[in-house]
Amino acid sequence: MQQVQPVRLFGNNSKRAFLINAALTQFQLIGVKNVTMDHLARQTGISKKTLYLCFRNKRELVLEVVKLIKYRLKEQIYANAIESENAVQELLSQTNVLVRLIELRHVLSEMSLRDYPDAIDEMRKFKLTYLSAKVRNNLKNGVVQYLYRQDLDIAAATYTYLLLAEALLIQSFNNIDMVMRSIDIFIHGILNSHGLYFYQQYQTVNRINIIKSEAMTNTGSS
């Protein structure tokens, strides 16, 4: 069975935080529906009594898992924003957030969460308020920086980006190359010639970093 890398916690080692992390790992491995409280107790070696002292029911546990994911995604979005020198680099960096969302689609899709309305509401708020605001702000900055088309319809472009993210989230494929190509088409549609120059430079740097990373991995495994 495929191993899933545990998600980092908030910086504390409480039993509740441990169980949230363990639940996320199990959700990724076998799906939200298939993880019962009995299953989680067996996998963690924690008694059901203790488990129910931490969480009233599975609905509360699922909600806390979604909140943890949302926290980590916000953390990544913020880091990308402050580390980017302009709107183009930030938008390219935020592609990692979409890739992460897609990796977690079996946990975050509304189909997976259909029995957990509170968790669905939490994800909708994240996408329709926080993520939407960040995309809209990036598009405004790109226009001001003369990197995006000056006639760009920011509201329509924001809506298109969110539709793309939602479409990728519900797909069953695991082809990251297709994801990157889809995002590339969107980005090319909003750039002007100046922005395209920067975009191509950043893409080249990303490719070099990927090659270096793969080389280091191969050296370490030989």
Image: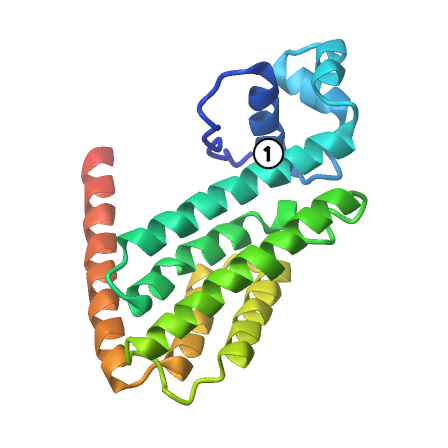
* Residue 75 horizontal side relative to residue 167, left or right: left
For the residue pair 118 and 163, the one nearer the viewer reads as 118
* Residue 107 horizontal side relative to residue 139, left or right: right
For the C terminus, the quadrant is top left
For the residue pair 61 and 155, the one nearer the viewer reads as 155
Q: Is 33 above or below relative to 16?
A: below
Task: Tell me which corner region of the image, top left, top right, bottom left or bottom right, holds residue 26.
Answer: top right
For the residue pair 51 and 25, the one nearer the viewer reads as 51
Q: Where does the image place residue 125, in percent across and percent down from the top left?
A: 64, 54
Q: Where does the image place residue 105, in percent across and percent down from the top left?
A: 60, 51
Q: Is 217 above or below relative to 81?
A: above
* Residue 200 horizontal side relative to residue 119, left or right: left
Regarding residue 178, the answer to whether it shows in the image is no
Regarding residue 110, the answer to whether it shows in the image is yes
For the N terminus, the quadrant is top right
Q: Is 219 above or below relative to 161?
A: above
Determine the residue positioned at 48% across, 28% down. Answer: 9
Determine the residue positioned at 57% across, 32% down. Answer: 25
Q: Look at the image and name its color scheme.
A: rainbow
Q: Residues within 10 Å of mark 1 (few under 14, many from 20)?
A: many
Task: Tell me which corner region of the image, top left, top right, bottom left or bottom right, holds residue 184.
Answer: bottom left
Q: Give the SS element for disc 1.
A: helix
Q: Is 135 above or below relative to 54?
A: below
Q: Where does the image place residue 213, in percent across and percent down from the top left?
A: 23, 47
Determine the residue positioned at 66% across, 37% down. Answer: 30
> Which residue lies under the disc numbered 1?
24
Amino acid of disc 1: Leu
**Outermost residue, bottom direction?**
151
For the residue pair 119 and 217, the one nearer the viewer reads as 119
Q: Where does the image place residue 74, in percent across and percent down from the top left?
A: 47, 47
Determine the residue positioned at 59% across, 34% down. Answer: 24
